[in-house]
Amino acid sequence: MGFSEGWQNAGMENDPLLFFRIVSGLGAVGCVFAAMYVFQNASRFFGVDPEVPSENASARSQTQLLVAAVLAHAFAFCLAGMVFL
């Protein structure tokens, strides 16, 4: 193979889904930072609310679990977009 044939193979390959991989990676990093923010401020978000006296600890735990499930699914979606695209 001479110089005239090899110059086309130099550099990065043409990947049309690279943009979506980058966006998915940024989304995964954003999910990690969002989860850190939510769980650092958990007492503020999921603490006792004096305006809702009928709310008990199990209702607050369920809310925490649902928020964690949404964050986990969003992270898994972005991770799958990064890996499988």
Image: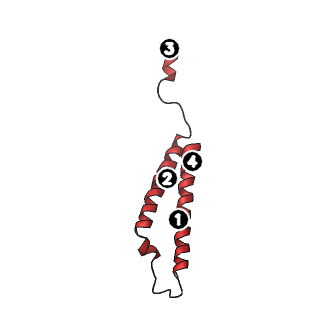
Distance from the alpha carbon under mark 1 to that under mark 2: 14 Å
- Disc 1 is placed on an element classified as helix
- Which residue is identified by label 3? 4
**Residue 23 pos. (x, y %):** 50, 48
Query: Label 1 sits on what residue type?
Result: Ala
> In the depicted view, which residue is nearer to us: 79 or 59?
59
User: Residue 68's mark?
Assistant: 1
Contact? badges 4 and 3 (CB < 8 Å): no
Distance from the alpha carbon under mark 1 to that under mark 3: 56 Å
- Which residue is identified by label 2? 28
Query: Label 3 sits on what residue type?
Result: Ser
First reached walking from the N terminus: tag 2 or tag 4: 2
Q: Residue at x 51, y 43 (%)?
A: 19
First reached walking from the N terminus: tag 1 or tag 2: 2
Q: In this view, does 83 lie above or below 35?
A: above
Query: Label 4 sits on what residue type?
Result: Gly
Q: How is the image coloured?
A: secondary structure
**Residue 53 pos. (x, y %):** 50, 88
- Disc 3 is placed on an element classified as helix
First reached walking from the N terminus: tag 4 or tag 3: 3
Contact? badges 4 and 1 (CB < 8 Å): no
Distance from the alpha carbon under mark 4 to that under mark 1: 20 Å
- Which residue is identified by label 4? 81
Residue mark closest to the camera, 4 vs 3: 4
